[in-house]
Amino acid sequence: MHTVHRAEVTGLYIETGHRLITCVTGRLALVVVDVRKGSATFSRWIPVDLEPVERPTVVIPPGTAWGYQGFSEVSVVVTLHADVPLGPQLDPTDADLQITWPAPAAASGISLENALARGDLPE
C-alpha cells in the first residue's frame, strides 16, 4: 500500500513486469505512457481516474511508464506486481510528454530524451 497526498505525484516509473493498481481510499489521476522505442504510440499517454466507488483496477503492462497524482487530501493505493525491479523514473513534467496533471507537478526523474539516449527504454 502507498499513501498519496493531494497534488503529490508518484512516478513516472518505467514498468518492466506487469502491475495491477487500484485505489482503496480517496481519488487519484493515473497516467500510463507508452515508452516502447519504435511504437506507433510512443510517448502518448492515457489518463485513468481511480476512485474506490467504482474501484477500477488497471493493469500496467511492460513497456509503459506510469504515475499518479492525488486528487483527495489523502489517497491509498494498492499495487500487485511481479518480483522485478522498476526501470528508471521519468520526469512527470517532461515537456516532450505534455502530460496534463490536475494540479501543478514537481519535476523529478530523467527526461524521455535522456532515457532514450541512455538505452533505458524497452523495444
Image: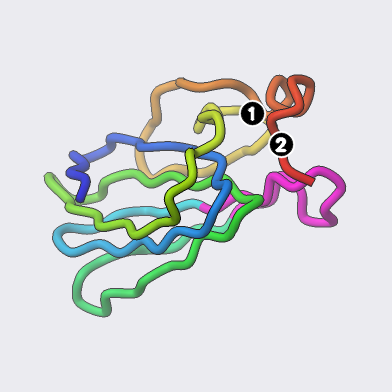
Q: Nearer the viewer, residue 36 or 9?
A: 36
> Tag 2 or tag 1, which sits nearer the N-term?
1
Please tell me whether residue 118 is drawn above or below residue 63 in the rendered image.
above
Residue 119 as seen in the image, left or right of residue 62: right
Residue drawn at the location 82% of the way across and 53% of the way down: 39
Name the residue beneath numbered marker 2.
121
Q: Look at the image and give the residue range highlighted in magenta.
A: 32-45
Q: Position of residue 108 (x, y in %)?
A: 46, 21
Which element type, helix, strand or loop, lies under badge 2? loop
Q: For the residues marked 1 and 2, what is the alpha-carbon distance in whole angstroms?
A: 18 Å
- Determine whether 93 is above or below 63 in the image: above
Q: Residue at x 74, y 24 (%)?
A: 113
Q: Kindly report which numbered mark, 1 or 2, lies closer to the viewer in this rendering.
A: 2
Who's the residue at 48% across and 39% down the image? 85
Q: Which residue is mark 1?
A: 95
Looking at the picture, tell me which residue is in the foreground, 46 or 120.
Answer: 120
Q: Quadrant of residue 69?
A: top left
The percent position of residue 45, horizontal first and vertical second, equals: 61, 52
Residue type beneath disc 2: Leu
Q: Position of residue 107 (x, y in %)?
A: 46, 21
- Give the side of residue 105 with respect to residue 93, left or right: left
At horizontal 61% and vertical 54% (from top left) the residue drawn is 62
Which SS does the magenta portion mostly show?
loop
Q: Height in image: 118 above or below 32?
A: above
**Could you tell me the amino acid type at mark 1?**
Ala
100 on left or right of 20: right
- Give residue 2's position: percent from left, percent from top: 21, 45
Residue lying furthest bottom: 54
Residue that extends furthest to the front in the rendered view of this protein: 83
Q: Secondary structure at mark 1?
A: loop
Q: Indicate the quadrant where residue 5 lies.
A: top left
